[in-house]
């Protein structure tokens, strides 16, 4: 089987080289993004692998016209796809899974960095100010209540790891996870907002979860709440978050994702104006940590993403059950 790998990075190439002979596939590895122009690389090939580049209707149409019938994205999220166009064309779409420890560990790191005011400490230390002051005094995690929103694979793993810190853990999710129940108490949405010192988001994007964190929900949170997001940027209304930080209602935030990040993250933008005003404002606050969607990025997850995109394409080609295919 031949598979076109679009937008291949150097770090991915190592793993594709390792897995291609193990699965008996031929990979056509391209550094270019998928587009109307680069669809020609997929001529006569039924399955391609992409990353988080915009998969617009014209691009999907061009790939379909060349014979592509299955697209595997080397990501969990699908917000870079025009899914309506994929449904119209009859294209089948799959994502990948990877070790949840990467994002869960990163989440806990961000929680600790936020409550220990690491951004402010680092800025002061870089300027040579090593004094003890209110701006660098942190809080002990064991004295706080952490609210976990979403208890899927990653949210559950965060709960399991947080248990070792001795903090109180509350959880809110549409469905209960037995493993999470061993360490967290499930509560309703209003109770989670009211009792949590820290709120960490672990939900997939959907119309129901879009701007779940907004001016109204922030108003019902504890004063000085810490908001952590390693899931999807659209879960938070950025303007509402900015207002919350400026008023002091939000004591700190740690964000690995941001709404409208597509086209910004994973690019070298040094020396250029940041074409996202809310992101620029949030980055300026001393109590807001912003990282560029890198919570997933470890050697293990890159290996998992490369291997599972190959396996997903093979399952499609062979007509096998495919755990990564999305029901459109």
Image: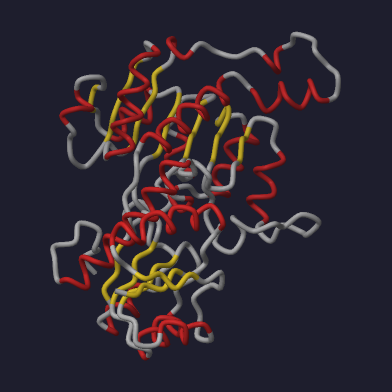
Q: Quadrant of residue 77?
A: bottom left
Residue 271, placed above or below residue 147: below
Residue 162, placed above or below residue 319: above
Q: Is residue 123 found left or right of 243 in the rendered image?
A: right
Residue 16 position in % (x across, y down): 42, 58
Number of disc labels: 0
Residue at (19% x, 61% y) in the render: 322
Q: Residue furthest right?
A: 128
Residue at (44% x, 69% y) in the render: 5
Residue at (52% x, 67% y) in the render: 7
Q: Quadrant of residue 60?
A: bottom left
Rendered-image quadrant of the C terminus: bottom left
What coloring was used for the rendering?
secondary structure
Residue 300, placed above or below residue 211: above
Residue at (69% x, 16% y) in the render: 136
Residue 22 position in % (x across, y down): 31, 57
Rendered-image quadrant of the N terminus: bottom left
Residue 65 position in % (x across, y down): 36, 91
Q: Is residue 328 found left or right of 299 in the rendered image?
A: left
Residue 251 position in % (x across, y down): 58, 27
Q: Quadrant of residue 31?
A: bottom right
Give whichever of 99, 145 is nearer the camera. Answer: 99
């Amino acid at each position: 089987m031949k598979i076109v790998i679009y937008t291949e990075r150097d770090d991915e190439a190592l793993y594709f080289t390792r897995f291609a002979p193990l699965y008996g596939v031929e990979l056509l590895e391209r550094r270019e993004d998928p587009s109307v122009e680069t669809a020609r690389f997929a001529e006569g090939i039924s399955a391609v692998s992409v990353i988080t580049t915009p998969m617009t209707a014209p691009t999907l149409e061009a790939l379909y016209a060349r014979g592509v019938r299955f697209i595997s994205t080397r990501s969990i999220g699908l917000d870079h796809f025009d899914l309506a166009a994929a449904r119209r064309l009859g294209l089948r779409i799959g994502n990948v899974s990877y070790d949840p420890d990467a994002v869960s560990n990163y989440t806990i790191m961000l929680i600790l960095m936020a409550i220990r005011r690491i951004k402010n400490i680092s800025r002061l230390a870089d300027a040579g100010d090593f004094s003890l002051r209110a701006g660098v005094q942190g809080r002990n995690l064991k004295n706080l209540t952490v609210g976990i929103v979403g208890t899927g694979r990653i949210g559950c793993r965060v709960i399991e790891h947080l248990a070792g810190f001795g903090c109180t853990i509350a959880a809110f999710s549409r469905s209960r996870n037995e493993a999470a129940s061993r360490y967290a108490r499930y509560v309703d949405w209003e109770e989670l907002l009211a009792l949590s010192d820290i709120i960490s988001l672990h939900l997939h994007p959907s119309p129901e979860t879009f701007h779940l964190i907004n001016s109204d929900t922030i108003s019902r949170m504890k004063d000085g709440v810490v908001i952590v997001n390693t899931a999807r940027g659209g879960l938070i209304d950025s303007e509402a978050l900015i207002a919350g930080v400026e008023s002091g209602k939000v004591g700190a935030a740690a964000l690995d994702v941001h709404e409208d990040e597509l086209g910004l993250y994973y690019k070298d933008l040094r020396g250029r104006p940041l074409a996202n005003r809310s992101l620029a404002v949030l980055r300026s606050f001393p109590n807001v940590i912003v990282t560029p969607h890198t919570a997933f990025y470890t050697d293990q997850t890159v290996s998992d993403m490369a291997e599972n995109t190959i396996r997903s394409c093979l399952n499609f080609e062979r007509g096998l059950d495919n755990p990564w295919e999305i029901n459109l």
